[in-house]
Amino acid sequence: MSAAVKSKAATYAAVDLGASSGRVMVGRVGPGSLRLSEAHRFPNRPVRVPEGLRWNVLSLYTGILDGLRATGPVDSVGIDSWAVDYGLLDADGALLGNPVHYRDTRTDGVAEKVWAAVPADELYAATGLQYAPFNTLYQLTAAASSTHLSQARRLLLIPDLLTYWLTGEQGTELTNASTTQLIDPLTRDWSRDIATRLGIDLSLFAPLRQPGDPAGALRPEVLEQTGLAGPVPVTAVGSHDTASAVAAVPAAGEGFAYICTGTWSLAGLELMTPVLTEDSRAANFTNELGLDGTVRYLRNIMGLWLLQECVRAWGDPDLGALLREAATVPALRSVVDAGDATFLTPGRMPERIAEACHRSGQPVPKTPAEVTRCILDSLALAHRKAIEDAQRLADHPVDVVHIVGGGTRNALLCQLTADACGLPVVAGPTEAAALGNVLVQARGRGLVGDLGSMRRLIADTQLLERYEPRGGIATWHAAEKRLTADERRPRP
């Protein structure tokens, strides 16, 4: 790469799709500079049809086209999204039905069938993936006898499907593929033995791509629809949004934990080797693949989904006022297990939280502010537990916690997390996934270097806020013991 190319600024479109909304962001990268602006934001509303819960993927694609129309000239495009879900294509490359939503109930009871063929401990040792009922492996097992799967000639994960529609080129990006429970985290390739034992045809998947690999160029029809002047290359980024977000954690060195907050909280460490022990499996930690040979060692926590569902049930009250009132509610009055699958499906969230508190003999939150405080205390407690467990299991101590993503806007949650962990919290950037997406594209032009230099650029250019822990760590320890005791209590 010439010095002239390295010094030239460039503009990138980052398509960042979350479980509740999508956005097309424009990143401008130059020597020592990084600016991000929003071109277009659009809702991501799943649809419940007679056969179950489905993604409205055509609406998402329309939102992407509208966003690219609003970006102006760009040097490259990259797409990241949530993990595990996929679209099936027939022999002509046409989509076979709307992709199934990971919160659909079709995987209920499927894990036991999988474990009968491959015991859970063997599955973890081979793939390093935590148990989650919606992992792609369980979805494919649930779909084994379906007409769509029998007709399929290609399976594309969501960002790869949308990239295919933009470019006509097919591939499977590695960071997202690692969430399928079909990748060996040691070889960073398919776990063919696991797939064979479960009857999963790996030829359905397109060839693996690495973050930064070329993924084609916008088709002439897309150029016409968006008004962009070609050629416009599309770059494979860390297409799992968490992989892009972790790449944008503004950390120095290795002694940090991260929490990617949004609909989910993903709390853990960045490692160079996976942790595949039985203790790690029992603690339900996952080993997902990141940039530059890294491993995202983390635990999935239900996240702000709990509050999002409550706010929806309450008729969308003013969130700022609700959080201010929640800050006045006594701390740790009631807590729930924020990782409990009880809270996975939509609907009746305030009632389900109240029922969980009642079952455990705690005061039942009644007002929206009390329910909100219960949720935020519970999330902070789950963050504490995940980070403590990760340090112990990986033998990897940390001295700071970085929070990135939408939860950085929630100052109360950030402060409670600092209090619960007894560690300083650095919050920001909010649009971490989009920034990581942009920087992987920029790296292909030599505008940034390794992961460390990407993070230094984030730290130097983005707004960050630091929260110091306040006293009272013993109260969090007591709440954790109370919650653990409730988890062990026999259920009727």
Image: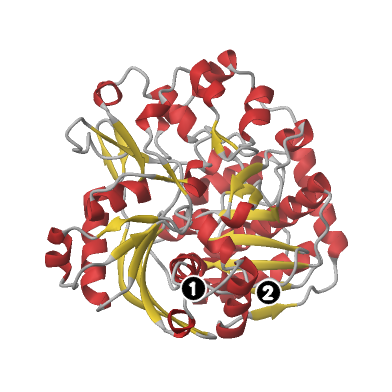
Label 1: how many Cα within 10 Å (few below 14, some 14–19, many 20+): some
Q: Residue furthest front?
A: 2
Select label 2 or label 1 by which is in front.
Answer: 1
* Residue 484, image x, y percentages: 77, 42
Contact, mark 2 vs mark 1 (Cβ under 8 Å): no
- Is 3 left, or right, of 394 in this rendering? left
Q: Give the residue displayed 69% in from the left and 60% down from the top.
A: 380
Above or below residue 479? Residue 434 is below
Of residues 466 and 174, which is closer to you in this image?
A: 174
Q: Give the residue displayed 21% in from the left and 31% down from the top.
A: 90
Residue bearing the label numbered 2: 426
Q: Secondary structure at mark 1?
A: loop
- Is 243 left, or right, of 40 in this rendering? right
Q: Quadrant of the C terminus?
A: top right
**Res 16 → quadrant:** bottom left
Q: Secondary structure at mark 2?
A: strand
**Res 54 → quadrant:** top left
Above or below residue 138? Residue 247 is below
Amino acid type of the residue that numbered disc 1 sits on in the rendered structure:
Gly
* Residue 265, image x, y percentages: 58, 55
Q: Give the residue displayed 36% in from the left and 44% down from the top.
A: 171
Label 2: how many Cα within 10 Å (few below 14, some 14–19, many 20+): many
* Residue 104, image x, y percentages: 39, 36
**Res 249 → quadrant:** bottom right
Residue bearing the label numbered 1: 446
Asked if one can make out residue 42 in the rendered structure from this viewpoint, the answer is yes
Of residues 220 and 426, which is closer to you in this image?
A: 220
Amino acid type of the residue that numbered disc 2 sits on in the rendered structure:
Val
- Is 70 left, or right, of 411 in this rendering? left
Q: Which mark is residue 295?
A: none
